[in-house]
Amino acid sequence: MADELGSGGLNRREFSRRMLALGAGGAFLPPAMMKWSGAAGSGGPDQVPSSPLRVNAERFLRSFNGLDEFGGTPDGGAHRPAYSEADREARGYVLELMRAAGLETRVDAAGNLLGRRDGTEAGQAPIMFGSHIDSVLRGGRYDGPVGSIAAVEVAHTLADHGVATRHPVEVVVFQNEEGGLYGSRMMNGEFSRDELTIEAASGYSIKEGTRLIGGDPDRLEMAVRRPGEVAAFLELHIEQGSVLYDRGLDVGVVEGIVGIRWWDVEVTGFANHAGTTPMDARQDALLAAARYVEAVNRIVRGRPGTHVGTVGRIDAEPGAPNVIPGRVTASLELRDLSMDTIAELHEEIRAAARQIGAETGTEFSFELTVDLDPAPVDDEVQEVVAASAQAMELTTLRMPSGAGHDAQSMARIAPIGMIFVPSVGGVSHSPEEYTRDEDMVNGANVLLGSVLALDTELD
Ligand SMILES: [Zn+2]
């Protein structure tokens, strides 16, 4: 995908220079749209525009807050599982916002909401941007809606100012992100029909749910986009971690969405009488597992980088107070942008487990159960996002996304970019989730600037 863009017209250095000199978005407006600062600037050809295009912050926040009517909870969270009544009503609300923004709306066979605005050049693939509005059970009101409502606002801003883009723009709200990226995987063609019978959090099967929201589960192929059919995909999202907030930074430029591997870990010892077996004659699988949990944390923290490792599940058998545990099943999860790092960490952890096994008379086995490749973020799109943010004098950080997003599905078929805004305290999937208004508005403006820049720079 990097090649696809790289062979295009984007000369990174040239582009960055122009972005920085002129301000995101504003640089690419028709001359009549430009408002130049006169006396305040240095004058001459290098003067800086005082007001490049910005979203209507008040309207954006009003639209965002309006979503609370559909699944907002009294504790300030959101309960909008995919296909629930709240989800369906919220989708109707977003379709109305899309129409008010002048978009031509439709629901594709996958049940994704789409709003399209034509471009000026025939045959161009659309620049697509958006996110999701479904939530986890009793979750937060920012995860998904920030990027979805901002996407509509960006289109509305283009309409307000009569900005003509070369590429069509397409705003998307993917269905059932939280259940497993269903809408975006239906769009990229990865979705398997076997998954239609899976039960969603709302109790409906994927098939029933997709039908309920206006999709057609019998004709999902109609929703598939092939490589080249989307010029680029952008997603604005809350970080869901605390990195930006802790460092007081405005915008995260996502470098990639991490790969994930899970293993089932089994520790075999020997179950025996807890009263009669001397302490030096035990093969205690739970004791070995405890040392393993500690070793995973030590090994993962012992290497610099943004990788993470977790043992999130442990179960001892037979599980009685008076029996030495003979068998433990546990887990291992590792995430990083580099699968090599994941593999190296896993080797170190296995070596430590062998050592612990030798010391405790137990044996460890690891079985790989989940193996998800990282999704790369296109280098050129990262540059576009970073330059857009910097042109607004926002501080940025290149960072991986440790959580999965619809953008990772879209990375299979198009160059993608992701924009993160801070989550206060790093809390997410909880009613306590909170992102400040000004950060949401910053994110929407960076999205707008990035869309306009890509429209100019892509083939
Ligand atoms: Zn999300």
Image (spheres, rainbow, N blue to C red):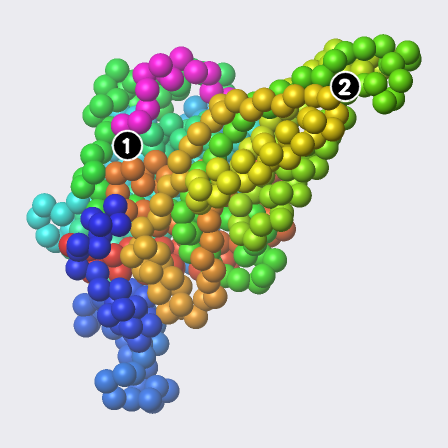
- Is tag 2's residue or tag 1's residue first in the polypeptide sequence? 1
Q: In the image, residue 439 lies at what x, y percent? A: 50, 57
Q: Which residues are magenta?
A: 188-201
Specify the quadrant of the image occupied by residue 381. bottom left
Answer whether residue 276 is magenta in the image.
Answer: no
The number of callouts visible is 2
In the displayed structure, 431 sits above or below 354; it is below
Q: In the image, residue 309 lies at what x, y percent? A: 58, 39
Disc 1 residue: CB within 8 Å of ligand 1: no
Give the camera-side residue of 383 and 151.
383
Amino acid at circle 2:
Gln
Residue 6's tag is none
Describe residue 197's horizontal placement relative to residue 140 as left or right.
left
Query: Would residue 208 be seen by someone viewing this image from the given angle?
Result: no
Element on which disc 2 rests: loop
Amino acid at circle 1:
Asn
| Residue in the image at 31% along x and 86% along y | 38
Give the camera-side residue of 127 and 141.
127
In the displayed structure, 224 sits above or below 68; it is above
- Graded by Cα atoms within 10 Å as few (under 14), some (14 to 19) or many (20 or more), the crowding at tag 2 reads many
Q: Residue furthest right?
A: 275
| Residue in the image at 29% along x and 83% along y | 47
Element on which disc 1 rests: helix
Q: Are marks 2 and 1 in contact (CB under 8 Å)?
A: no
- The span from disc 2 to disc 1 (Cα, nearest Å) is 50 Å
Describe residue 351's horizontal placement relative to residue 131 as left or right.
right
Describe residue 311's horizontal placement relative to residue 261 as left or right.
right
User: For mark 1, what is the residue?
Assistant: 188
Specify the quadrant of the image occupied by residue 222. top left
User: For mark 2, what is the residue?
Assistant: 283
| Residue in the image at 40% along x and 40% along y | 374
